[in-house]
């Protein structure tokens, strides 16, 4: 009988392990299938940018989502990791020209490791004084750090290349796995590998004792101190890990773009990390992945359709922080929890009503914003999802306001349903 | 019945297809800031290009092909620019133009060079209309890059030639933005003034943080104390507006010789304070003596709300047309070959694309802001009045470029 029990336990353990494997298999399958669905050059460029941003956003979430440290200077690690990788790539170029030396044997596909070491070292050197406190103090210090390093980027042109940055060539050194890295399509496999490896490593980090302790530091640092842990030490270690993975993303970027400028160290890319993590959801491991995909697509594609693209990105960020602080992935988790409880069918109509309301309000806002921008000096007609409006004409304004009003009404009408079934 | 309709549709589609291929379209992508805080630099260029493309198309297009302008927003970020470049290439666009920011230009030059080496037969041509880092046509010159604006050193050469001939100027003050461009301006000003007018004393050489200073009064009082009778500045954007504003409020009499005194927004924000105080070295000026140009200024301001500021964009498209007609092709390889050494007549005189380094050679003008001008800038009565022309030979500079040509 005890044998029986052990066997069941092993079997259930195995089942448990297999269930844990499923998301990773799906992730790997998606990475493998994507290049066969999107085959044109621009899709590869976009997918490469998304891969880099996924690692960047996840490394940021190690600090904010898991460690409770709000940082405004995360791009420092991304940027300096990228600089380290770029200098290494230039060294490979020089060494392979001579055909000898250590660098002549280092393949370019290993550059993310150099970036990782670079980012980690920077965090190691800078991090200790910062990690004494979390919260506002930490946010202010990282803000200052980011600005300081970005300013230093302009001051030492031999290292940072002035505002023109430094650039390298990825088609040098020994080739691995027959990856020539000439086209964006080649680079995709490189990016896909490192994205997968980076995501897996960061997930594994959350399972380590240190990863668990970082959650504890976030939730209650005082209590942690009572049971004998130093919150500062834990924050410091998390800071280093996060900086390393930021550097890993930087190393991927160095190979992908073959250029790095001091701008990459500044506040704007740091803000991007926060934006991606917050839009996706800070509390869920895969949240920043969702955020990175969405924000990268918005940044690169939205400006083709609207002059007000930056405004929309801001509005989406604002509304998510205000109305859905758990982010998009938080919403998905919510639905999954309801499904597990069996309350999904009951709650679906309310949610559906809410979604319709949000879409209507968004549509109304888009029409109004586009009308405003057209009046400000754009074209003669305003095109919103294929519907044409006369710029400055009453129809457009009416349609916009009507959509807004109906949206708000639907929101109100379905609120009761949502609250009753919550 | 249905069948006959279908054949009709097919036939007409086929006809349309052949008609379309007869009037082929060549796309030129503008990769510049079109949204966000820097849009005021990219949008006027975009509108200008679209307006001038209409004219080119009305005059037979590029060797018969229709020119179409595509705007791609790069947010003045080098990495985003490369994403947009890839987008352009993917859409089959082989001509790109960009102007704002030498950092972006640097990224584009290297990646266009790499793309062309890695994708023979799909070459891309990069037409630079405003990124003025001298390196791009010297040590970093590229066969696939053509610059239609005078570089920073050429502008300084023209400006110092003018200052050297002005015997009233004895003390010069330099104030520039603290980054590589500002340092380059300061360095070449010192070198060239020393060579041309050794008696001129440089009484100050200041660098201020880029786009961060809100109140320039301390700098201005330093200039006043130094007794300078001329100020040279490569500042652009808010840095030039706020600097001149502070000088006017302080009562500083010394004139400002600038690179970008007439860029969009400056005239509106300075108003009366800029009159007789702000000078600009540029390839054109605000008098619009040429009636054709005057017409374009009026038309463009009415239509788009932007001034006809970038004469060099018109020159660029005219040269592109001349090259396409000469080569009998719109293939970038043929265009590049035809552009080398090409000369055309423009409203300001003859301009030539020097084959050695792909740097345009053109006359330049010093102008000063005046009130009550016939063609006011940005809907005001102010504009830049021409006071001197610097001949092409007094603008030009030798190059150190060793061009690597394909094959």
Image (cartoon, rainbow, N blue to C red):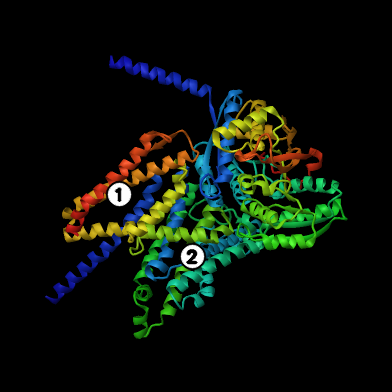
Quadrant location of the N terminus of chain A in the rendered image: bottom left
Reply above or below: B4 against A389. above
The residue pinned by badge 2 equals: A74
Q: Residues within 10 Å of mark 1 (few under 14, many from 20)?
A: some
Residue B59, horizontal then vertical, whole percent: 61, 23
Residue A277, horizontal then vertical, whole percent: 40, 60
Left or right, residue B201 beside residue B150 = right
Q: For numbered disc 2, what is the local secondary structure? A: loop
Depth check, front residue: B164 or B109: B164
Real-space CA distance between mark 2 and mark 1, rounded to the nearest whole angstrom = 32 Å
Left or right, residue B296 beside residue B186 = left
Reply above or below: B154 against B218. above
Reply above or below: B54 against B161. above
Residue B177, horizontal then vertical, whole percent: 67, 57
Q: Quadrant of residue A28?
A: bottom left
Which residue: 41% across, 44% down? A369
Left or right, residue A28 beside residue A147 = left
Quadrant location of the C terminus of chain A in the rendered image: bottom left
Q: Which mark is residue A358?
A: 1
Depth check, front residue: A250 or A400: A400
Reply above or below: A287 against B149. below
């Amino acid at each position: 009988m005890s044998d029986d029990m052990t066997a069941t336990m092993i079997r259930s353990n195995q089942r448990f392990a297999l269930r844990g494997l499923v998301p990773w298999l799906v992730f790997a399958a998606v990475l493998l299938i994507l290049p066969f669905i999107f085959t044109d050059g621009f899709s590869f460029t976009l997918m490469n940018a998304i891969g880099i941003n996924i690692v960047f956003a996840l490394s940021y979430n190690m600090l904010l989502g898991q460690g409770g440290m709000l940082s405004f200077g995360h791009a420092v690690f991304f940027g300096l990791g990228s600089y380290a990788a770029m200098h290494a790539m230039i060294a490979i170029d020089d060494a392979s020209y001579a055909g000898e030396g250590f660098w002549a044997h280092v393949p370019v596909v290993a550059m993310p490791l150099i970036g990782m070491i670079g980012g980690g070292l920077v965090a190691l050197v800078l991090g200790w004084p910062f990690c004494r406190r979390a919260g506002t103090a930490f946010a202010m210090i990282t803000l200052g750090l980011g600005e300081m390093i970005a300013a230093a980027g302009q001051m030492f042109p031999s290292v940072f290349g002035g505002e023109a940055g430094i650039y390298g060539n990825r088609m040098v050194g020994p080739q691995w796995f027959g990856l020539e890295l000439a086209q964006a399509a080649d680079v995709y496999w490189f990016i896909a590998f490192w994205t997968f490896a980076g995501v897996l490593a960061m997930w594994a980090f959350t399972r380590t004792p240190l990863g668990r302790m970082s959650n504890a530091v976030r939730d209650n640092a005082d209590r942690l101190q009572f049971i004998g842990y130093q919150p500062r030490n834990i924050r410091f270690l998390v800071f280093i890990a996060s900086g390393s993975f930021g550097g890993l993303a930087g190393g991927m970027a160095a190979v992908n773009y073959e250029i790095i400028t001091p701008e990459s160290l500044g506040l704007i890319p740091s803000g991007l990390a926060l934006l991606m993590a917050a839009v996706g959801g800070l509390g869920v491991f895969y949240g920043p992945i969702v955020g990175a995909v969405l924000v990268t697509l918005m940044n690169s594609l939205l400006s083709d359709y609207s002059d007000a693209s930056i405004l929309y990105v801001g509005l989406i960020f604002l509304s998510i922080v205000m109305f859905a602080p758990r982010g998009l992935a938080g919403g998905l988790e919510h639905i999954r929890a309801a499904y597990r409880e069996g309350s999904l069918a009951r709650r679906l109509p309310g949610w559906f009503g809410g979604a319709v309301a949000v879409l209507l309000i968004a549509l109304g806002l888009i029409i109004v914003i586009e009308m405003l921008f057209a009046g400000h000096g754009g074209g003669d007609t305003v095109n919103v999802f294929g519907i044409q409006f006369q710029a400055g004409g009453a129809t457009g304004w009416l349609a916009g306001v009507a959509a807004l009003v109906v949206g708000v009404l639907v929101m109100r009408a379905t609120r009761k349903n949502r609250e009753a079934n919550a | 019945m249905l069948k006959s309709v279908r054949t009709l549709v097919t036939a007409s589609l086929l006809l349309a297809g052949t008609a379309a291929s007869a009037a082929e379209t060549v796309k030129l992508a503008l990769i510049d800031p079109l949204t966000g805080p820097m849009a005021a630099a990219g949008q006027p260029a975009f509108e200008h290009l679209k307006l001038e493309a209409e004219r080119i198309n009305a005059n037979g297009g590029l060797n018969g092909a229709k020119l179409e302008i595509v705007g791609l927003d790069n947010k003045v970020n080098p990495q985003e620019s490369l994403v947009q470049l890839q987008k352009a290439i993917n859409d089959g666009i082989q001509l790109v133009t960009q102007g704002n920011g030498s950092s972006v230009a640097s990224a584009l030059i290297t990646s266009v060079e790499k793309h062309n080496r890695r994708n023979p037969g799909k070459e891309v041509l990069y037409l630079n209309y405003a990124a003025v880092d001298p390196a791009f046509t010297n040590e970093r010159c590229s066969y696939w890059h053509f610059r239609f604006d005078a570089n920073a050193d050429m502008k300084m050469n023209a400006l110092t030639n003018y200052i050297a001939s002005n015997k009233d100027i004895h003390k010069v003050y330099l104030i520039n933005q603290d980054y590589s461009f500002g340092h380059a301006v300061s360095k070449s000003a010192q070198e060239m003034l020393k060579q041309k007018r050794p008696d001129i004393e440089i009484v100050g050489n200041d660098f201020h943080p880029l786009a961060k200073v809100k109140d320039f009064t301390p700098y201005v009082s330093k200039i006043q104390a130094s007794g300078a009778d001329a100020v040279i500045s490569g500042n652009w954007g808010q840095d030039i507006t706020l600097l001149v504003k502070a000088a006017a409020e302080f009562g500083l009499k010394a004139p400002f010789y600038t690179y970008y005194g007439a860029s969009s927004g400056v005239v509106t924000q300075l108003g009366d304070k800029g009159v007789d105080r702000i000078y600009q070295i540029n390839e054109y000026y605000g008098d619009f003596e040429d009636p054709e140009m005057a017409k374009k200024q009026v038309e463009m301001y009415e239509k788009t709300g932007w001034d006809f500021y970038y004469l060099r964009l018109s020159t660029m498209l005219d040269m592109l047309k001349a090259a396409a007609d000469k080569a009998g092709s719109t293939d970038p390889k043929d265009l590049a070959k035809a552009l080398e050494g090409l000369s055309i007549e423009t409203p300001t005189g003859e301009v030539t694309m020097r084959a050695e380094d792909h740097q345009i050679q053109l006359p330049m003008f010093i102008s000063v802001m005046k009130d009550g001008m016939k063609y006011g800038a940005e809907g005001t009565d102010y504009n830049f009045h021409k006071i001197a022309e610097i001949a092409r030979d007094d603008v030009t500079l030798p190059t150190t470029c060793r061009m690597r040509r394909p094959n």
